[in-house]
DNA sequence: GTAGTTCATCTCATTAAATGAGACACATCA
DNA sequence: TGATGTGTCTCATTTAATGAGATGAACTAC
């Protein structure tokens, strides 16, 4: 056996290269926002030849993952991603269950309500319903992603993971949390304690979004694992004690109903 | 030259096979809804070997396109699709522009408002804001996709395409429209005329959703091409003449504002 | 606890399929 | 019309995906 080490130093036990390349193309395209990416963007950031680039672009277009921009030579993400993404966001059927409930809460209380799920070291927003009162939030919409630790929903999710897993995640995110959000791990751990003690969390205040605050509660399955979290966000001035209790109770009721229905369909084949 | 015909009969000028395979896997997974797909689902519907399947599954997981279901041996769509999909749905920045306006309309009038874009022979829903009044609709949420011809937004989009293109699309969709929605091409063409004459459309009534109706107006760029369509949906009983005019005017005002802002950022590099 | 089942991975030879270089065709715009 | 940059093609090369079958790991049922 003389040919052990793979020549490609970084390719140990990795995905098929075509997939990796395709993903790189999609990420470059996504990083261009609504303007997409140009040929030069791709050629600059990728390390394969132009024909190959075009072959992949063509393939991704055929699959609906990319489409041509109205501007010649630029490419945008395709709508197939939106369609599949909508499916993906309905993990365990939770989103369909949550949507009407979030809407009801938003209409009743006027604040904005969110459904989050864990995605590795991040929390991802599965659904938002905005209420009548304007609000600022870290995520603008469905598909928004935050490092776990940011926002009240993060805390609600973290609190019910295993201690080891939680530490790993926090450790992994520590730098980002501090640099990008000015949030310290210790403060998150304090808030996790609050969550475990009182059943809800308020998030950790960093230097960003100082005018807003929120509440979150976990959505737990029968074994206590977090399926997701429901949260809300509002102007600090609206967060009176009464309003807080009202909203919390509303959320708790809706989540209880959801969980009952969810258990029926979650683990059935 | 004796080796002309590709052995794989259907592979003429097609995408890289890995991409095709990956997409097949994603589609099979998507077709399982929130329960995802099992190994057997894949093996039954695909024509490559088990090791290859696992290699691709692993790759797709690494890319965030798939994740493991809590149920062993099942796979769900990954959240990366949701994140990319959210980006994809913001084509030309239209969705960000539209969201607050749809929300305002929904809160003001109580009906449900939608943003649609064309996606090949389909219309895809980029955004929904539901109002206080309950409503049925062909699309439940962002990411919903309909064949062009179904729904009022479809008509608003079709009306401003070139005649040839429109005919091709309708011809392509004819069978599906009739079979799945009980909608005849001729009726769509009538409604297109109405759209062109009056500036809005009401959709074509098939046998489905008979209790609901709606309105749609196009979102046109400076050259008259449709960027998308804004539509609304409500119980028929709510559609009085007054309400119709109110809502139409509201939508037209919001779209006018959007288009002004959109032109600023659409074609700028 | 142990057998049975299904999921997942590994190894290795084979070969198909992706790749790169460079030429070429096609738009778009000045 | 000519210049620029986009998109496609051909073809030889070789990488990198593939299949068969064995093996390992995880969960289930008894």
Image (cartoon, coloured by chain):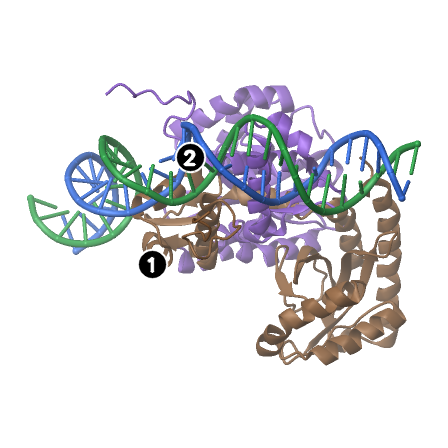
Chain colours: A brown, B purple, C blue, D green
Contact (Cβ within 8 Å) of mark 1 with mark 2: no
CA gap, disc 1 and disc 2: 23 Å
Q: Residue at left 64%, top 37%?
A: B30
Q: Quadrant of residue B265?
A: bottom left
Q: Residue at left 68%, top 30%?
A: B40
At label 1, counting other C-alpha atoms closer than 10 Å, the crowd grade (few under 14, some 14-19, many 20 or more) is few
Residue A247 is situated, as x and y percent measured from the top left of the image, at 84, 65
Q: Quadrant of residue A96?
A: top right
| Residue holding disc 2 | B15
Q: Is residue B79 visible?
A: yes
Q: Residue at left 35%, top 46%?
A: A53
Q: Chain of mark 1?
A: A
Q: Is residue B226 visible?
A: no
Residue A44: image tag: 1
Residue B223 is situated, as x and y percent measured from the top left of the image, at 36, 46
Frontmost residue, D29 versus B244: D29
Q: Is residue A238 left or right of residue D11?
A: right
Residue A97 is situated, as x and y percent measured from the top left of the image, at 78, 47
Q: Is residue A148 left or right of residue A238?
A: left
Query: Please, what secondary structure does the residue beneath circle 1 have?
Result: helix
Residue B13 higher or lower than B26, as above or below: above
Query: Please, what secondary structure does the residue beneath circle 2 have?
Result: loop
């Amino acid at each position: 056996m003389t040919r052990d080490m793979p020549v490609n130093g970084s390719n140990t036990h990795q995905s098929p290269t075509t997939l990796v390349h395709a993903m790189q193309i999609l990420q470059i395209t996504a990083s261009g926002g609504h303007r997409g990416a140009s040929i030069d963007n791709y050629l600059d950031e990728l390390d394969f030849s132009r024909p190959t680039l075009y072959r992949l672009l063509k393939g991704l277009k055929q699959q609906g993952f990319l489409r041509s921009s109205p501007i010649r030579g630029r490419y945008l993400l395709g709508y197939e991603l939106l369609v599949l993404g909508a499916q993906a966001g309905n993990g365990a059927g939770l989103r369909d269950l949550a949507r009407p409930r979030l809407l009801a809460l938003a209409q009743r209380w006027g604040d904005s309500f969110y459904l989050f799920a864990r995605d590795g070291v991040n929390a991802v927003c599965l659904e938002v319903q905005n209420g009548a009162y304007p609000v600022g939030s870290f995520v603008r919409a469905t598909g928004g992603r935050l490092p776990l630790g940011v926002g009240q929903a993060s805390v609600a999710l973290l609190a019910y993971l295993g201690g080891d897993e939680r530490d790993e995640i926090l450790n992994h995110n520590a730098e980002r949390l501090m640099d990008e959000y000015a949030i310290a791990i210790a403060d998150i751990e304090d808030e996790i304690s609050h969550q475990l003690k009182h059943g809800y969390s308020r998030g950790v205040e960093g230097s960003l979004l100082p005018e807003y605050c929120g509440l979150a509660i976990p959505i737990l399955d029968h074994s206590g694992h977090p399926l997701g979290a429901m949260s809300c966000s509002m102007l600090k001035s609206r967060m009176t004690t009464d309003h807080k209790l009202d909203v919390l109770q509303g959320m708790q009721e809706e989540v209880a109903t959801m969980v009952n229905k969810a258990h029926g369909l979650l683990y059935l084949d």
